[in-house]
Image (spheres, rainbow, N blue to C red):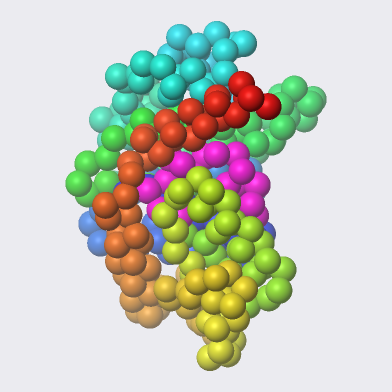
């Protein structure tokens, strides 16, 4: 399962991504944590102290390995003959071997990395740092006990890049504040446009009726709530219980749905069709 964690900046998405990684790892799963935010909070929370290599800046070279020329749109990769090549972070392909770091047994990390020269000198925007995930996630094959947790960029920008079609399920983290709830609603609406299964998690709950505020603002109720009084990184048993509850509902959301690859193919076909009529 590939789980993407989304939310407004400061909502606690990196914290929720961290506790999910820790919970899954402690439960015996083999986990790939992907830090797709150039702030790299997830990598820091997991104790990573290295300096790359980062996948940021490798999008064009990754495309080229599939035979795409620089002028060809990425749509071509998924709207023509679907490539037979697949990625695996436990039986490393060439790309995973280069950019996946093993932190400990059964725990791996991949990072988009900080701003690079291509971004700083205006050759590409900062979204390019995580762009390789547009190819990597749809073509990533997972074993029965392998799980991926992606800590995405802040707000709806993370969804409008199109990367989340490579998620099996998205976790939208909101806090009971108007701007977080407004951003959460935009994220949810865009996930629906991409047909990505999702659940909502309430973070920093202060009052019993905060869940009602979330339901009213976002159009759906949170499946669990992390109280303001509880430090999610404290290792408290309640955190594990909330993570288990979250994962159970996330699994239910994806049952019977389309695959990451088929959803991505549909996205690119829609892109190509729109471009011919726009």
Question: Would residue 202 be visible to someone looking at this image?
Answer: no
Magenta-drawn stretch contains 56: no
Q: Is residue 164 magenta?
A: yes
**The residue positioned farthest toward the bottom in the image shown:** 208
x and y percentages locating residue 135 in the rendered image: 46, 29
Q: Nearer the viewer, residue 240 or 59?
A: 59
Vertical comparison of 148 with 82: above or below: below
User: Which residue is rendered at x = 31% and y = 26% of the image?
Assistant: 86
Q: Quadrant of the C terminus?
A: top right
User: Left or right: 10 with respect to 247?
Assistant: right
Tell whether 142 sits left or right of 112: left
Task: From the viewer's side, name the closer residue of 35 and 272.
Answer: 272
Q: Residue furthest left?
A: 144
Query: Can residue 274 be seen from the camera position used here?
Result: yes
- At a point 33% along the width and 76% down the height, the residue shown is 241
Which of the 4 image quarters holds residue 91?
top left
Q: From the viewer's perspective, is residue 175 above or below residue 131?
A: below
Q: Which residue is pictured at 37% across the width and 68% down the height?
A: 246
Asked if 40 appears above or below 92 in the picture, the reply is below
Residue farthest to the front?
277
Q: Residue farthest to the right?
A: 121
Q: Position of residue 117 (x, y in %)?
A: 72, 25
Q: Is residue 3 above or below residue 126?
A: below
Residue displayed at 49% across by 67% down: 200
Q: Based on the displayed image, in which of its 4 quarters is residue 82 positioned? A: top left
Q: Position of residue 90 (x, y in %)?
A: 28, 35
Side (left or right) of 188 relative to 4:
right
Residue 275 versus residue 72: which sits nearer the camera? 275
Mark count: 0
Q: Which residues are magenta?
A: 155-170
């Amino acid at each position: 399962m590939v789980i993407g964690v989304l939310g407004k900046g400061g909502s606690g998405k990196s914290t929720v991504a961290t506790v999910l990684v820790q919970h899954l790892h402690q439960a015996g799963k083999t986990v790939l944590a992907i830090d797709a935010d150039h702030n790299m909070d997830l990598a820091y929370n997991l104790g990573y102290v290295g300096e790359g290599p980062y996948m940021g800046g490798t999008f064009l070279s990754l495309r080229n390995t599939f035979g795409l020329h620089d002028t060809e749109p990425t749509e071509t990769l998924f709207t023509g003959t679907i490539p037979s090549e697949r990625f695996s972070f436990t039986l490393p392909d060439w790309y995973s071997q280069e950019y996946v770091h093993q932190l400990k047994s059964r725990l791996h990390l991949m990072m988009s990395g900080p701003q690079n020269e291509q971004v700083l000198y205006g050759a590409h925007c900062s979204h390019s740092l995580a762009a390789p995930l547009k190819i990597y996630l749809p073509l990533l094959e997972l074993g029965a006990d392998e799980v991926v947790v992606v800590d995405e960029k802040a707000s709806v920008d993370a969804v409008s890049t199109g990367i989340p079609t490579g998620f099996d399920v998205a976790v939208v983290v909101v806090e009971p504040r108007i701007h977080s709830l407004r951003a959460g609603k935009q994220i949810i609406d865009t996930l629906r446009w991409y047909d990505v299964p999702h659940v909502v998690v309430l973070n920093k709950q202060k009052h019993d009726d905060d869940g009602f505020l979330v339901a009213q603002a976002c159009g759906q109720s949170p499946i669990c709530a992390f109280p303001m009084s509880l430090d999610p990184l404290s290792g408290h048993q309640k955190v594990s219980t909330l993570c288990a509850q979250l994962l159970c509902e996330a699994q239910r959301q994806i049952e019977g749905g389309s695959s990451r690859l088929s959803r991505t193919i549909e996205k690119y076909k829609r892109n190509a069709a729109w471009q011919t009529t726009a």
